[in-house]
Each structure stands twice: as structure tokens, then as C-alpha cells.
Image (cartoon, rainbow, N blue to C red):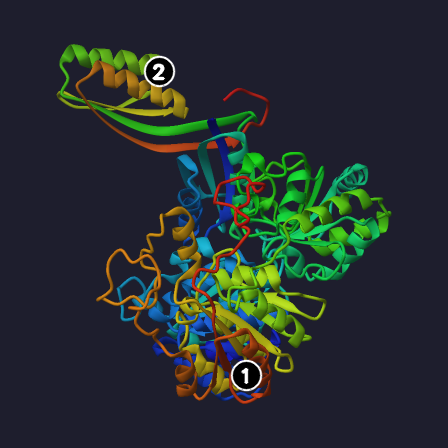
């Protein structure tokens, strides 16, 4: 018997095992919402803005490993998720995003709330399609979930015109789908891998560079086992942080623009760089001609197009991280890397990661308390200085997880992603780190957190500035703070060089703002208030808590490599 | 940097051409020509693409194309024996009777068809390689005051036996 498109839509979600959908209603999706209203298996989360919605789905997907599902209306509903699509595309987050569309006959007429969302998002989605025939609906939804979740994961858009939703058609939802142009790699070339291992075995100063792909593939344990067996030190990218426990003796730290001195020195001095699950983004390599200049490079990645794209690679291996490591573990033998490890340790002693302690409350102090307080929390960051401090100072063992917007660097990501992570992991504590700038980009999601009963702890690092840009202005632009002071008023002098007595109060008052949402707000001005605030926030199980940490304005992220410079040229002080 | 040729099998669906061409503009690849039409299987279209690039970029272009869900197969035609032709119409306008004779001679030498003649104009229909067409256009431009050219981009297919393009 035939059923309507809207019925098939819900049936498809059920068969895909979807338990949560992030949805914002509107004219062209009311039928789908009505159908969701009539069932019980799938919970609908209503955000307060579609950008918040898609970051929530990302947080949910990244923290659970499941595919995040979004449902938004046509026109502005669809365009509001574009930033999140780009974010998910860069950071390989599996999402299936359903957008409503005007009825087929109206497409192209500039109808009310009509946009060509599939056309607009071609370069930032893994796949996108408008359903043009009711009988294609089931196959297309199946394809969407298959493509989003396999290979190198990513976002998929399924655009469903309103009349497709109400037209009757086949009731069947296919169990599998064959796509002739899409064959995700599920093998590994043993010859290449052997070559890689041979090269690694012969190395004197071998180094593992682990990227986000290790976390996406959830290959952490295998990577750790491989590093332990071979005794090869590990550095990570920002997205790869947590690939091995940060407390492990073989773990050096993050490399890259704001990486640890020892990690960047190790990359510059190693003789074989075993990289896995990274695309050698410019934030990792700096000046390409000077990147790992002494090293032969092995590169394992599931995406052929990521290999030999930015850096020239000596041994490319196309493979899922899990699969490659499984094979490598069969061959792995213990290497004597003691001298090399001692050298890295010496670099670390020479320039350890630390901030001055005579300077009021520093981000490092806050993270030290965080590290002592939480045992299995999911950490989520926004984008900016606090994000870099988090990737420098957070300790991540097997039970912790770090969720951050690495590729696109989307301010406003943190709060909604934390809410999504909490919805996916109700039993775990979720701590969000944000700046005073980024938090305000999706502050309306406070209402979503309260409505969903998602008691996330939001640590705001308030320095009155858009600090990451301010830092560049401080170092490279003669302290001309163009449009980065968030206390600036019309009455301020044009050439202000920094905070002074005439500065006006900060808006908003984050504590009062939290309370107005029915959430909790705590302001911490000094180091001795940090622990009490964290302890208090953990007691609130009903609603989120904003802890506003008043940090010093001129705290900067160090070390720092100027964009385009070699990684060995670090600004340390 | 040199010209390279790709044959691309893609799904014959709405938006695929836009997606392929969008890849070239979005990633700053230097697209020289692109033609597309259906194949013997009407669910499949075949594109013939010419790009100007260095070796590294060309490898990346092929990988990026391969990654697209709508792309079924990428064939590198750069160094394989192929047959390639491009359709080109050239109108030579405002010419004297003597000049007309010259156009006829040129047509004969280039082995192209004179498909229409007017009082003071001639229409040539050329099925040559893209390079040969370039040469013809250059010659016509240098000899006559006013010409009008429309060309379709090259289509290419692998040779059945070994032969030159």
C-alpha cells in the first residue's frame, strides 16, 4: 500500500535508528513536524536559531559517533545552517540535513522562502540533492545516511519539496543502496603499508603526528598500542588532541601555530614523520618549504585527495586509521628511542608551556582546576584564545573527549555544540569553554539548554576583547585595536591603546543574563574563587551554569608562529 | 604547465554540471574547455574536460573529481591515443570576391566545409582538433577584417587501434 512522503520520512528515520532530531519548523516542513508529533521514538529538539541547531547536531554527532539529523524549513531556515554545513564539512562530522522546499511547480519562481540550497552548498557538503520524484524519496534518504556516515564522514543535504511530503508513493525504505560513483575505501594496500613500516623501523628520530582522523575513526586505543609497542613519541594536531592520553610519557603535545615548543621542535628535527588522519592544514605546517625539513613523510588518510595535497609525501597510504593501525600492530617491534625521547624532554624543559603566576587569574590556573575537578567530562570549546589555551592545557585521558571547531574556526560553535553533546550523553558532565565574543554569537541557545534540561557548565573567559585578533594587533599591528574591544562605545577616543579608567562597563552582564534565562550565573574575579565556582556549578542539575572568569586583557596565546613562517620560529615570550 | 585532457563519466542528473564546474572555479583550477552530453546509457553523461595545470595540481583535480558522489569514473586522456574533434563555425564577413576565393582556398587546405555563402560572406564548418581550430581562427583573424566564431569545445574518445590524435 502506498504511503505519503511524510510518513515515509518518519519511517526512514526510525529504520536508521535516529533517536534525536534537531528541528526548527516553518511553512514547508510543517507536514514533517506533524508526522513527528504523532510518534514517540524520536525526540525533537527545538533550538532558538538554525545556526545553533546545526552546531547542536554536530556536538551530538561528534560526541556519540552517530549521525546528527537536522530538519529546517526552506529559505532562511536553510541558509541559516550554511555555516554549520561548512564546519561539519571541514571537521568530518556525519550529518543528514533535511530542508523543506517550495512545491516542485514553484521552484525557480522566486517563491516565498525559496532558495536553491543544494546549489548554494555544493562546495561545503559531501552530497546534496533535491527530491524531484516521490518514488525516489526512500532511496535518497538511504543514500544520505550511507554517504554521511561512511568513508570520510561529512554533511549531506536532502531538500524535500512540500508536495513530495504529501504525495503518496511506495512505502518501502530500502535496506541498502548501491551508488556507482561512491565507493568508500575499506581496504589498505599492504605493500605501501609495509614500505611505511620499514621506513619507520629504520628511523633514528621517528615521530607520530596524529590528526583528527584518529578521533573520527575512534582508533585511539590502536594508536596508543602502536606507539607503546614501538616507543615512538606522539604529537597531535588541534583536532587530534586526545588521540593518545595527554598524561602518557610518549605524548609530547600539540604541534602547529600555537603548539608546544617541544612538539614543533620534534617535527622540525624528526627523520621520519608518521602522520595519520591529518590533511596538513596551514596551521600545522606553517611555511611549507620548512615543514619537517629533515623528515621522510608517511601519510595515512582515508581520503585520497588529502594525500600529497599540501606537503609532498614519501609514502602515501590510503586507508582508514583503524584498518592501517590494525595491520601495523601485527608487525610492530620495540624500537630504542630513548635518546630521541630524552632530546624531546630536554626541549620541553627548555620552554615548557606555562603562564606567569604573578599576573592575577590566568587561563592556565583555570584549566588546572578543571583538570583536577572533572573525571570523565566532555569538553567543548568555542573559537579563539580560550580554544587554544584549552588545547594546550586540558588533560585528556581515555574518558575525556574534546570537541572543537578546528577547520572552519566557527565562533558561536561552543555553546550549541555543548548542548548537543549533553543531549547525546545525558549521564556525562559537559563543560563548554567560550570567549565573551563567541558566546554572544549563539547566546540564544541558553534557552534551548534550559528547555531541554541540559545542565552544561559554560566557562566564559572574559577579557573584554576579541582576544585572538587583539593578540595579532598587539604583536603585528602596532597595538591599533581596530574593532576588537567589546567595551568600546561611540564616545571612546578613536586611537585607544587599551583599557583605562574611562572604560565603560561591559555588556551584557553574563551573570544577570544567565539568570534571565532561568540558568545559573557565577562571576569569578580571582584565583581563589575558581574551585568554589566549579563545585557550585556541578551541583546544578536542572539548568546550565555560566561561570564568567574575569581574566587579564593582555594575556596572549604562546608560543605562537606567525602565519606563513616556519614552525621552528616560535614567539615564546 | 600544460594542457591535459580528462574524460569524465557522471550521473545524468540536475546540477551535476554546475557541481563539476563549481569545483574548478572554487579551487582555482584553470578550466580550458568542458563539453558534456549523454552516452549510450542515458542515465550517464560524459564530459570531455581540458585543463591547464602542473603535475601536482592535475593529480589533485583527478582526486577531487573522483571524490564527488556524482562522478562515476575519471579517465586521464593526456597521454593515451585518442580521437579528438571540436566543432567550430567561422563566419568571414564583409569580403570582396577575391577575398572569397582566398577563404575557399583556406577551407580546402584545412579540409573544412564551406557550408554557406552570401554576397560578401562565407560560413565555414570545421571539425578539427582544438589546436587546429585555434590555428585556423588565428589565420582568418590575420587575413580578414571581420570574423564571427562559435565553437563547441572538444570531445574526445580513446582510439580503437593505436593512432595519433
Eye-nearest disc, 2 or 1: 1
* Between A458 and A148, the one nearer to me in the picture: A458
* Residue marked by disc 2: B110
User: What is the crowding at mark 1: few (fewer than 14 residues within 10 Å), some, or many (at least 20)?
Assistant: many
* Residue marked by disc 1: A455
* Between B68 and A285, the one nearer to me in the picture: A285
In the image, what residue occupies the spot 74% across and 42% down?
A: A206
Q: Secondary structure at mark 1?
A: loop
> Residue A84's spot in the image, x, y percent?
46, 64
Q: Is residue A381 left or right of residue A205?
A: left
Tell me if I can see residue A402 in this picture.
Answer: yes
Q: Secondary structure at mark 2?
A: helix
> Residue B6's spot in the image, x, y percent?
50, 35
> Residue A324's spot in the image, x, y percent?
74, 51
Q: Quadrant of the N terminus of chain A?
A: bottom right
The vertical placement of A369 against A240, above or below, is below
> Residue A355's spot in the image, x, y percent?
57, 59
Q: Is residue A9 left or right of residue A106?
A: right
In the image, what residue occupies the spot 60% across and 83% down?
A: A535
In the image, what residue occupies the spot 62% across and 60% down?
A: A150
**Residue B35, quarter of picture:** top left
Amino acid at each position: 500500500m502506498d504511503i505519503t512522503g511524510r510518513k515515509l520520512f518518519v519511517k526512514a528515520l526510525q529504520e536508521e535508528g535516529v533517536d534525536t532530531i534537531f528541528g526548527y519548523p516553518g511553512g514547508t516542513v510543517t507536514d514533517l513536524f506533524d508526522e513527528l508529533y504523532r510518534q514517540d521514538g524520536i525526540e525533537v529538539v527545538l533550538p532558538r536559531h538554525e545556526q545553533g541547531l546545526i552546531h547542536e547536531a554536530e556536538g551530538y554527532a561528534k560526541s556519540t559517533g552517530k549521525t546528527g539529523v537536522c530538519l529546517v524549513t526552506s529559505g532562511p531556515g536553510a541558509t541559516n545552517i550554511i555555516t554549520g554545513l561548512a564546519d561539519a564539512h571541514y571537521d568530518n562530522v556525519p550529518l543528514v540535513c533535511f530542508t523543506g522546499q517550495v512545491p516542485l511547480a514553484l521552484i525557480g519562481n522566486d517563491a516565498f522562502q525559496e532558495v536553491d540550497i543544494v546549489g548554494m552548498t555544493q562546495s561545503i557538503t559531501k552530497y546534496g540533492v533535491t527530491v524531484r520524484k516521490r518514488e525516489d524519496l526512500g532511496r535518497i534518504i538511504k543514500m544520505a545516511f550511507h554517504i554521511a556516515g561512511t568513508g570520510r564522514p561529512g554533511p549531506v543535504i536532502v531538500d524535500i519539496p512540500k508536495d513530495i511530503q504529501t504525495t503518496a508513493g511506495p512505502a518501502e525504505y530500502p535496506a541498502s543502496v548501491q551508488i556507482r560513483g561512491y565507493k568508500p575505501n575499506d581496504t589498505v594496500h599492504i605493500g605501501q603499508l609495509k614500505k611505511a613500516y620499514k621506513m619507520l623501523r629504520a628511523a633514528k628520530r621517528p615521530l607520530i603526528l596524529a590528526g583528527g582522523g584518529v578521533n573520527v575513526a575512534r582508533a585511539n586505543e590502536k594508536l596508543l598500542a602502536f606507539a607503546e609497542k614501538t616507543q615512538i613519541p606522539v604529537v597531535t594536531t588541534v583536532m587530534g588532541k586526545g588521540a593518545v592520553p595527554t598524561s602518557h610519557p610518549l605524548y609530547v603535545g600539540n604541534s602547529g601555530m600555537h603548539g608546544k615548543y617541544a612538539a614543533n621542535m620534534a617535527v622540525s628535527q624528526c627523520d621520519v614523520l608518521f602522520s595519520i588522519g591529518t590533511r596538513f592544514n596551514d596551521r600545522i605546517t606553517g611555511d611549507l618549504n620548512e615543514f619537517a625539513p629533515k623528515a621522510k613523510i608517511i601519510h595515512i588518510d582515508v581520503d585520497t585527495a588529502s594525500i600529497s595535497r599540501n606537503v609532498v609525501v614519501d609514502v602515501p597510504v590510503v586507508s582508514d586509521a583503524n584498518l592501517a593501525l590494525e595491520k601495523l600492530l601485527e608487525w610492530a617491534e620495540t624500537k630504542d628511542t630513548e635518546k630521541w625521547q630524552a632530546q624531546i624532554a630536554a626541549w620541553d624543559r627548555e620552554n615548557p608551556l606555562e603562564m606567569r603566576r604573578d599576573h592575577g587569574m590566568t587561563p592556565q590556573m583555570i584549566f588546572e582546576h578543571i583538570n583536577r575537578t572533572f573525571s570523565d567530562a566532555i569538553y567543548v570549546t568555542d573559537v579563539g584564545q580560550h580554544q587554544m589555551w584549552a588545547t594546550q592545557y586540558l588533560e585528556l585521558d581515555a574518558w575525556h573527549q574534546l570537541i572543537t571547531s578546528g577547520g572552519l574556526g566557527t565562533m558561536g560553535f561552543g555553546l550549541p555544540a555543548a548542548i548537543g553533546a549533553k543531549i547525546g550523553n545525558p549521564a556525562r558532565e559537559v563543560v563548554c569553554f567560550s570567549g565573551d565574543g563567541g558566546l554572544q554569537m549563539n547566546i540564544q541557545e541558553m534557552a534551548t539548554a534550559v528547555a531541554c534540561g541540559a545542565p552544561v557548565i559554560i566557562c566564559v573567559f572574559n577579557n573584554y576583547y576579541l582576544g585572538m585578533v587583539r593578540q595579532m594587533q598587539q604583536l603585528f599591528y602596532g597595538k591599533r585595536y581596530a574593532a576588537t574591544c567589546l567595551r568600546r562605545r561611540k564616545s571612546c577616543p578613536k586611537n585607544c591603546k587599551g583599557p583605562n579608567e574611562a572604560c565603560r562597563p561591559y555588556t551584557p552582564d553574563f551573570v544577570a543574563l544567565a539568570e534571565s534565562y532561568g540558568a545559573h550565573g557565577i562571576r569569578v574575579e580571582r584565583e581563589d574563587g575558581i574551585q568554589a565556582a566549579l563545585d557550585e556549578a556541578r551541583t546544578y542539575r536542572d539548568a546550565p551554569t555560566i561561570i564568567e572568569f574575569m581574566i587579564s586583557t593582555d594575556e596572549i596565546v604562546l608560543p605562537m608562529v606567525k602565519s606563513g613562517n616556519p614552525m621552528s620560529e616560535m614567539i615564546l615570550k | 604547465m600544460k594542457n591535459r585532457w580528462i574524460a569524465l563519466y557522471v550521473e545524468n542528473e540536475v546540477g551535476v554540471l554546475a557541481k563539476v564546474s563549481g569545483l574548478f572555479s572554487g579551487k582555482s583550477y584553470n578550466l580550458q574547455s568542458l563539453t558534456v552530453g549523454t552516452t549510450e546509457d542515458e542515465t550517464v553523461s560524459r564530459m570531455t574536460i581540458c585543463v591547464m595545470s602542473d603535475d601536482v595540481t592535475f593529480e589533485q583535480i583527478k582526486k577531487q573529481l573522483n571524490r564527488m558522489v556524482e562522478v562515476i569514473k575519471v579517465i586521464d586522456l593526456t597521454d593515451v591515443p585518442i580521437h579528438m574533434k571540436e566543432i567550430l563555425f567561422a563566419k568571414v564577413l564583409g569580403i570582396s570576391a577575391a577575398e572569397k576565393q582566398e577563404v575557399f582556398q583556406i577551407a580546402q587546405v584545412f579540409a573544412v566545409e564551406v557550408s554557406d555563402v552570401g554576397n560578401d560572406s562565407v560560413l565555414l564548418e570545421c571539425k578539427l582538433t582544438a589546436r587546429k581550430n585555434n590555428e585556423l581562427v588565428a589565420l582568418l583573424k590575420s587575413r580578414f577584417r571581420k570574423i564571427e566564431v562559435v565553437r563547441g569545445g572538444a570531445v574526445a574518445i580513446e582510439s580503437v587501434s593505436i593512432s595519433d590524435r
